[in-house]
Amino acid sequence: MNLFEELQWRGLIKDTAWDDLEKVINSCDATLYWGTDPTAESLHIWHYSSLITVKRLAKAGHHPILLVGWATGLIWDPRPTAEREIIAYETVQKNFEWLKKQVTDLFDGNVEVVNNYDWTKDITILDFLREIGKYINVSYMLNKDIISRRLESGITFAEFTYTLLQWYDFLHLYETKNCIMQAAGSDQWWNITTGIELINKKLGKTAYAFTMPLILDWAGNKFWKSEGNALWLDKNKTSAYAIYQYLVNSDDSKVEEYLKVFTFLTPDEIIEIMKKHNEAPENRLAQKTLAKEFITDLHGKAEYEKVQKIIDVLFWDWDKLEIISKMSDDEKSALARETGSVKMNWSEVRLMDLIVESGLASSNWETKKMIQAGSIYFNEEKVEDIQKTIKSDDLINGVAILRKWKKTYKLILG
C-alpha cells in the first residue's frame, strides 16, 4: 500500500482537503505543519497521537514544521463553557521553551520549530484588520459550534480573535516557507479549512489539510489533561513505568487501534502480533509490544530497559536482590519513585519505625499485628521478630526491599 493508504489503514485520516490530497501525501516531499499552544509545561498523549503521525510523514520524506504558538497561547482558544484564565507572559515563555525542547527531542532534532509570536508581535491592529480581517465574514465565524454556543453566555473579543490568529499562521507559513499542508486533530477542522480559505482568497493558491480522529480510551474518554486521565510526555510528570502500566492494561478492544496509531511497526508486523495475541490473549502480547514500542520511541531504549528492571523487582519471582545489587543509581531512583521510599538516617533502626514511616502501617500497633499475621517481608524474608532492627550492613547496593503481603513494596534508602 502507498503512504496515503497506510495512513487510512491505521485510522489516521478523518477529514481531508482537497481531492488531490492523496497525491500530495504520496509525493513524500511536501512541507506541512502541526501546531499547539504552550498552555502547560508538557504535551500529553493526545498530542502524541497526532505528533507521531507527523513523524511518520517525516520518515517518509515530508518536511514538517512544528509550531508552538506563543502568541495564540497568550489568548487561548475558546472553550464551550467559559473563558479560560489568561496565562502570564512569563509562564507562556517558560512553557514554550519546555515544549520546544520536547518536540525537538521527539524528532531527534531533525525538525524545524517555529513560534508565531515572531511574526505577530510587530503587526499593528490596523494592519491585521486590513490584511486578515477583511477576508473573513463574521457570520461565517458565528457558525462555528463553540462560538455559537458561547453567544448567550458571552464570548470576549480576544477569544473571538483567536481563530483569526490561527488562520494567519497557515497563511504566513504558506507565504514564507511554502508550507502547503496542515495536519491536526479533528477538533481543529473548522480552523484548518478557514485557513485554507484565507490562503485561497488572499493568494489565489490551494492549500491542503487532513485531520486525525481523536484517540479515546476504552471507556470512550478523551486523553486530555482536562479529563483528569492525561499521560504526560514529560517523564518527570508521568514516568515511563506509569505509561507502561497504563498501556499494558489497555483493553483488548483498543490495543490493535493503539498499535496502528502509536507505533512504527509495519502493517504485516501488527497483523502477525494480533494473530498471536488472539491465540493467547491472557499473555497480553499486543499490550506489551505496544508499551515497548511507545516508550522506546518516546523516551529511548534505556528508559524502557529501566522499566523492565522495575517490573522484574515488583512482579516476578526471580532473585530480586540480585537484580537490585546490579542497579545503577538512576535505576534505583526510578524504582523508589514507583514504590515510594523511606530514608534510613541511622546506622541501626527499628524495622517497626521504618514500616510506620514508610506508610505501610499507621502505627506501631498496626505494625505489630501485620508482623504477627506474617504479612511483612524484609529483603524477601518474612519478618517474625517484632523488635527486629535494621543495620546499614543489611542494605544491598545501598537499598533494601520492604514488602507487605505480595505486591505492596517500599524501598529503604541508606
Image (tube, rainbow, N blue to C red):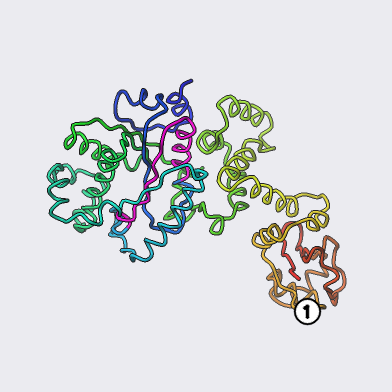
Q: Quadrant of residue 370?
A: bottom right
Question: Looking at the picture, which amino acid does disc 1 mark?
Answer: Trp
Identified at 41% across, 35% down, the residue is 63
**Front-most of residues 92 and 277:** 92
Residue 10 in the image: x percent, y percent? Answer: 48, 30
- Quadrant where the C terminus is found in the figure: bottom right
Specify whether residue 72 is painted magenta.
Answer: yes
Identified at 30% across, 53% down, the residue is 118
Task: Please provide the residue range marked out in magenta.
Answer: 48-73
The relative height of residue 268 versus residue 53 in the rendered view (above or below) is above
Residue located farthest toward the front when viewing the structure as drawn: 176
The relative height of residue 118 versus residue 247 in the rendered view (above or below) is below
Q: Quadrant of residue 61?
A: top left
The relative height of residue 389 versus residue 140 in the rendered view (above or below) is below
**Front-most of residues 339 and 60:** 60
Check disc 1 and report the residue beneath it. Answer: 346
Residue 128 can be seen in this image? yes
